[in-house]
Image (cartoon, grey):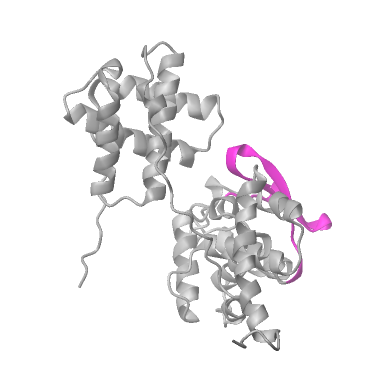
């Protein structure tokens, strides 16, 4: 039996004299770059891990950090079994931090600039099949306010291609129901309009009419956030963690293990592309700033070409 991997990262680890520069950088990310609270907190966790490593090594001055110290830290991440994508994220965070410190005169040299980002293995987005989507969305839901809410959540994750953070942050001002659109605020505060049609629109209408009023009216937390679309039994805004748990639960009901909200976003993109959607339109609906991010779905789509050829061409299997 293989032991489960454990990644240790202390969000409250001491960073010694690095505390003030870290606070300045996180304030810069929040105020000047306009990153969301969740993004700033993620940067803070990664950088605190990095600076705690340096502090434990007896280094408490940014100008005392050498390139070898940074490569030692990257190797330490690998020893702690961080995925390549997580290691890359940590390195990108520390490079940005050092660059900021030099620009602000907190440090004189940026030795992190010469440290390359670790190579990340190319991983195609995981999508479920159209048949699995049908099983997921057509399964029986409880005839309760929470059941109506859960159906609407699953329908909108797949029907609109939303990130889980985008879904949980929705307010009534985001719903342009007369135009059958959702105004989504994505990464970096960028807004986009996504169609709200078909079963996703129907499920949302039913939830807003027959589900949310009951959850919101009796909830103790309702007054704290009256604009929230998706609320819990206490009337407060649903968290990303809660949405992830309910998506996984409904996936298990139809024998889809480990289902995540982002899998439904990937499935949204993959199925649109397979159906002939234009790549530029798909880029806009997903909120990708760079078309190359969207193009990864063309690789997913190409994987079906061979299968289709083998199953339909009369001479495909002749040798």
Determine if residue 182 is in view.
no
Q: In which quarter of the image is the N terminus?
A: bottom left
Residue 200, by quadrant, is bottom right
Residue at (61, 78) in percent of width and height: 307
Q: Which residue lies furthest to the right in this view?
A: 178
Residue 178 counted in the magenta span: yes
Q: Give the range drawn in magenta.
A: 169-198
Q: How many labels does the image show?
A: 0
Frontmost residue, 317 versus 261: 317
Residue at (30, 19) in percent of width and height: 62
Whether residue 108 is visible to the viewer of this picture, yes or no, is: yes
When the figure is inspected, residue 219 is found, relative to residue 255, above or below; the finding is: above
- Left/right placement of residue 112 relative to residue 171 reads left
Residue 59 appears at what percent x and percent y? Answer: 21, 22
Instruction: Where is residue 2? Give x, y as percent.
Output: 22, 69
Name the residue nearer the viewer: 243 or 64: 64
């Amino acid at each position: 039996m293989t032991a489960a991997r454990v990644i240790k990262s202390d969000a409250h680890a001491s960073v010694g004299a690095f505390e003030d520069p870290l606070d300045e950088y996180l304030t810069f990310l929040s105020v000047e770059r306009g990153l969301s609270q969740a993004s700033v907190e993620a940067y803070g966790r990664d950088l605190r891990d990095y600076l705690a490593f340096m502090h434990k090594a007896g280094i408490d001055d940014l100008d005392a950090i050498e390139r070898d110290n940074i490569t030692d830290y990257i190797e330490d991440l690998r020893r702690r079994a961080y995925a390549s994508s997580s290691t890359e994220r940590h390195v990108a965070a520390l490079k940005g931090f050092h660059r900021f410190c030099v620009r602000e005169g907190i440090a004189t040299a940026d030795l992190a600039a010469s440290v390359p980002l670790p190579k990340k293995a190319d991983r195609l987005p995981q999508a479920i099949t159209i048949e699995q989507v049908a099983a997921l969305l057509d399964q029986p839901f409880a005839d309760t306010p929470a059941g109506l809410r859960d159906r609407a959540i699953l329908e909108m994750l797949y029907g609109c291609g939303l990130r889980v953070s985008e879904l949980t942050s929705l307010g009534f001002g985001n719903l342009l129901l007369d135009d059958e659109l959702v105004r989504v605020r994505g990464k970096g505060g960028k807004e986009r309009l996504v169609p709200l049609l078909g079963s996703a629109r129907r499920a949302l209408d039913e939830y807003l009419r027959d589900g949310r009023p009951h959850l919101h009216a009796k909830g103790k937390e309702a007054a704290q956030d009256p604009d929230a679309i998706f609320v819990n039994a206490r009337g407060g805004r649903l968290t990303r963690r809660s949405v992830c748990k309910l998506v996984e639960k409904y996936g298990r009901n139809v024998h889809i293990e480990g289902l995540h909200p982002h899998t439904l976003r990937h499935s949204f993109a993959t199925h649109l592309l397979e159906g002939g959607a234009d790549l530029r339109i798909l880029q806009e609906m997903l909120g990708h700033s760079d078309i190359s991010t969207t193009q990864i779905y063309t690789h997913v789509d190409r994987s079906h070409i061979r299968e289709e050829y083998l199953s339909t061409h009369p001479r495909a299997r002749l040798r």
